[in-house]
Every structure is written in structure tokens, then in C-alpha cells.
Amino acid sequence: MMPIRYSKRTITDSEQIDRFLMQAQTGFLGLADGAEPYVIPLNFCWLDGRIYFHGADSGRKIAIIDANNRVCFSVCEEYGTIADPVPAMTDTAYMSVFISGTIERVESPEEMRDAMQAMLDKYVPGYYPEPLSMQHVQKYRSSMGSATAVFRITPDSLSAKGNPVSDEKQFYPGRTLSMDL
């Protein structure tokens, strides 16, 4: 992986990266369809150092994955605008993670259940009183009626960067330059 150009924004704290990936809401799966890039936003979970997601068992995404299992996955959360009296210093507060790796269809029913349970725990915590049953996982169908596949991305490389914002620099509606001089 190429190093992050703006190295002072590099994040190497694995606990911070894990927390970020466990709470971030949307990731972007990057695939290569021949010479044409194909990027899909999706819900995901970070479990045991891997990205998991589920979806229909057929379609363009599946055809591309079957032809080329090399993928990238990107997650970014924006935390607001950083105000500064110097226009060139106005910036965005954020954190992002970029993963390169391989993608595989999960075959183990137990691993499928664990990944789908992790997604439920992330997106609707406490909503379901009981954990997913193996029977539910095996019979689950997508909104289009096809069987549901669970996928696992195993990272070869992972990089993270961010730009935190302090309360005194956070832009808010009504804030003006004269307040900062």
C-alpha cells in the first residue's frame, strides 16, 4: 500500500480504528469490472479483523467478484467543518479507513450467523430479544427473493487517517469571521 501523503493525519491506533469500523454506518465496496471501476455503498460489520456484509446471491456484483476477488473497501465519517480566519486553513473534520484485500463468500452457516448477528447488533442494538437462529439464516431471502449470500473481506492492508476538530474551531451556523479575530 502506498503511504498516506499527508502523514501527520495517519492514524495507527488499532483500538481507535476498531472502534471507528464498529460504529461507522456505510462502507463503499470497490470492485474492478475489467477496465471499469464499480463501487457499491453498503451496510457492513467489522468482526474479528474482517469486513462482513450480505446481499443477493446473484447480479453484477456477484459476477465481478467471481471474476476477480481483489477488492477495496473504504469508510469515511465527516464530523463537521473546521473554521479558520485564513480561508486556505478552513478544513473538514473526519476519519477514514481504506482496506485492500480479498473477498470470499462465507460458506459456514455458523460464520454467516455470527456476521448477520453482528450487523443486527450494530444497526438495531437491543431490538431483537433473541439471537438469530440457524434456521433463520439458512432460509433468509433478499428483498428480490433470491438466496442471501454473506461475504467476508480479509484485509491485506489497512490505512486510516483523520482530522479531529476542537470545540473552539468547530464551525456552526451563525459563526462569523469577526468572532475569531
Image: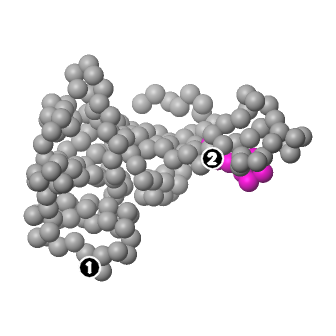
Q: Is residue 14 magenta?
A: no
The residue that appears at 73% across and 32% down in the rendered structure is 89
Which dot, 2 or 1, sits closer to the camera? Answer: 2
Tell me which label, 2 or 1, sits earlier in the chain: 2
The percent position of residue 12, horizontal first and vertical second, equals: 53, 46
Which residue corresponds to mark 1?
Answer: 130
* Amino acid bearing label 2: Gly
User: In this view, which residue lies farthest toward the right?
Assistant: 181
Q: Position of residue 32 (x, y in %)?
A: 26, 27
* Rendered position, 162 above or below 14: above
In the picture as drawn, the residue positioned furthest to the bottom comes out as 129
**Magenta residues, dominant SS class:** loop
Give the residues drawn in magenta, as a range: 163-170
Report the residue marked by disc 2: 80
How much space separates mark 2 and mark 1, taking CA atoms?
Answer: 37 Å
- Residue type, mark 1 in image: Glu
Q: Is residue 51 left or right of residue 80?
A: left
What residue is shown at x 56% (from left), y 28% (from top)?
5
